[in-house]
Amino acid sequence: MQCPSCKMEMEAGRAQVKGTILGFLLVGLSYQHLYFLPSQGAKEKIIPSRGIRPAHYCRQCRGLFIEPY
């Protein structure tokens, strides 16, 4: 897949929401979600807690494309 931002080839992989062991020890078990925050309007949950989605990442400009459900 070609990056829509810089036109370089993107690397296939997955986007995942996941906590860390340090976060668990400091805060405890909590739900974590990936959200999109528009400039106007309400936030939208993109990936629920512990969710995984197919994605493509551009190492050149660090762009990330998450495939829709």
Image: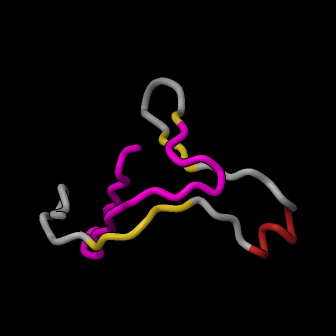
Q: Is residue 56 above or below residue 65?
A: below
| 66 part of magenta stretch | yes
Q: Nearer the viewer, residue 17 or 59?
A: 17
Q: Is residue 11 left or right of residue 23?
A: left
Q: Nearer the viewer, residue 40 or 52?
A: 52
Q: Is residue 61 above or below residue 43?
A: below
Residue displayed at 53% across by 26% down: 42
Residue 4, quarter of picture: bottom left
Image quadrant where one finds the C terminus: top left
Q: Residue furthest top?
A: 41
Percent position (x, y) of residue 18?
64, 64
Percent position (x, y) of residue 29?
83, 59
Residue displayed at 32% across by 68% down: 57
Give the colour scheme of this rendering. Answer: secondary structure
Q: Residue furthest left?
A: 7
Image quadrant where one finds the N terminus: bottom left
Q: Is residue 67 left or right of residue 33?
A: left
Q: Nearer the viewer, residue 47 or 24?
A: 47
| 43 part of magenta stretch | no
Residue 53, quarter of picture: bottom left
Residue displayed at 37% across by 45% down: 68
Residue 45, quarter of picture: top right
Q: Is residue 59 left or right of residue 50?
A: left
Percent position (x, y) of residue 9?
17, 71
The magenta region covers: 45-69
